Image (spheres, rainbow, N blue to C red):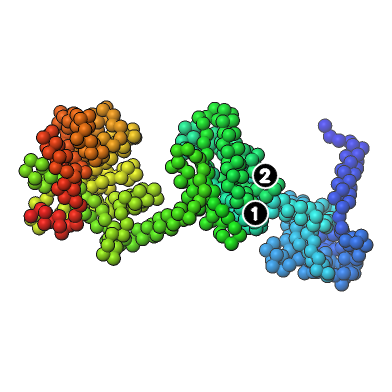
Amino acid sequence: MEQTDKEKIASLERSLFYESQYKSAIISEAICHYEANLSKDFIENEIFYKSEQGTIVSTTKLLGMSAPCKFSDFIKNWINKAIDPDYASKYEIFSNTKDYLLKSYSEGKRDHIIEYWYTNEKGKEFFLNQRFLLTKNEDGDICALAVLNNTTHAKKIEAQQHRNELERHAYFDPITGGYNYIKFKKELISANVRGSIISIDIHAFKLINTTFGTGIGDKVIKAIWDRIEEVFDFPKGDFAAHINADNFIAFCPTEDQNEIITKIKSISYSLNLISAELSLPQVKLYYGISMWCPEKTIDLSYTEAVTAKNNAKKLQDADYAFFEKKDMDRLVWEENIIENFENALAQNEFHVWYQPKYNPENREIIGAEALVRWIKDGKIFVSPGEFIPLFENNGLIRSFDQYIFRKVCMQQKKWQSEGRKIIPVSVNLSRISLYYKDITSIYSHIAESAGIEKKYVPIEITETAAVKDKRFKEITDAFVSAGFVLHMDDFGSGYSSLSALKSIRFSAWKLDKSLIDSIGNYSGERLLHHIILLAKELGIQVTAEGVETAEQNNFLSETGCESIQGYYYSKPVDISNFEKLMI
């Protein structure tokens, strides 16, 4: 239904009223506002602004102009005065404001807001909000209501909120809501007092994450953090942080060991509550403590605390340990070994030595075990009993194992090429290396590249590795399928499962020295007799290692042991001496 003239007039009046109210609302807090006819490029009235002190100042005169004036001249002068040229050059609206606004209106855009910083004559900065509301007047001209607001206070609040957010991300942990390591170090440097740094981690945390999920793992982290907050007195100078994973750090401005132990025990006593709250097995923490002073780097002190914590994990009767000088000596020694590793590989400082395996019936050499000596400057640099466990702990063992296996393969091929008689030389594969991806194909490639048959380089794997992992059978089957011969090393040192012995395809058992040392004892001898008998029934060869006396040799020979290794026949020797033994 069409509107009557009366209704049209009423509708127009309402629109004008609402437009008037809207404009009034917009300009009510403005420091400056004016109207311009864009179509005619015309500003009729003088323009004023309200200064920070509340006085009214003529903007027109401030710009060296008078009313009426051209809108394009006024806005150009204002831009030149108020807006940084580099900033203005980035935006089209500042290059030709009038034409830009007219084009916007034709495209249906009626409202434009521009924000910028303005510096007054006294050097004070203001953040200004410039708004243009576009309308068409009764003559059909495009007009603009220009409104300028000082939003400096709001901008500063926004900037502070942004800084707070950045600081939260930079200094606070997302799981605990407390300090992270960066903030911890910042606070400790600021505190500038002596005290104790405590490293804390959770026993078997990886197992918690794997079994119950990372969601539960995060809840454990948060629950432990809550206990730390309860025990450490933050208002009195204690503070702490969650570093990553299950690693925490705390600081107490005291060197009193009893005071530190009291705090540690308070945390540990409350762990039962965490287990009950989250329906988990008993949660256990380990602690390491190092003394800190402002002259010492925080990272060094934390490393010391971690070293002490790792020592605590070896203790039977405590879950904490204090860092001692001997720990530092050990730490320096380990760093020296690690730093020398790559150079040792490059300089061929790792030498393969051989300990022969003899047939006790005819005293012929029927095999050997490859052992390693680190020779530096013509002498043994460090014993394998020390550097091999270190390599296992820091991951270097993988490169080391492959390096030794390659050297043995190449030496076997060299002897074969020279027309020498070659015998199987077994090579140890560490438990750590065993579970690396594609280990079978890597070792196959090494042997095949050297051109040596795999039967001449048997792989020795310890008994403990054989019975502790369900994946072991799959890995050993892959080795056997690839053509390798497997020997179980240190048989009798662990707790072999008969079902595991039956299913895993070992060609030989190497009896541990602890069994050999029981010779002369009735029970020990009966055990050895039945082990050797069982091996024969299963078609498995037996090698006795660590044989040192004639009594041991004679017993083993009479019991049917086919292979003997030990000082009774020969200690480990270098290549030249081993070649002499083989003549």
Going by the numbered disc 1, the residue's amino acid type is Glu
* Corner quadrant of residue 76: bottom right
Q: Is residue 142 above or below residue 213?
A: below
In this view, the residue farthest toward the bottom is 64
Q: Judge whether 164 appears above or below 480 on screen.
A: below
Q: Position of residue 190 (x, y in %)?
A: 66, 57
Q: Is residue 278 left or right of residue 13?
A: left
Residue 36 at x, y percent in the picture:
85, 59
Q: Is residue 258 left or right of residue 392?
A: right
Mark 2 or mark 1, which has the lower sequence index?
A: 1
Q: Is residue 334 visible?
A: yes
Q: Which of 125/230 is in front?
A: 230
Q: Residues within 10 Å of mark 2 (few under 14, many from 20)?
A: some
**Residue hosting label 1:** 187
Q: Nearer the viewer, residue 557 or 175?
A: 557
Instruction: Tell me if mark 1 has few (under 14), some (14-19) or many (20+) residues whose alpha carbon lies within 10 angstroms of its own.
Output: some
The residue drawn where x is 84% and y is 34% is 2
Determine the residue positioned at 9% across, 51% down.
421
Give 239 or 172, whichever is nearer the viewer.
239
Name the spot of residue 271 as percent of width and height, x first. 57, 34
Q: Which residue is mark 2?
A: 233
What amino acid does circle 2 point to? Asp
Measuring 10% from the left and 41% from the top, which residue is drawn there? 360
Q: Nearer the viewer, mark 2 or mark 1?
A: 2
Say what secondary structure mark 1 lies in: helix
Q: Quadrant of the C terminus?
A: bottom left
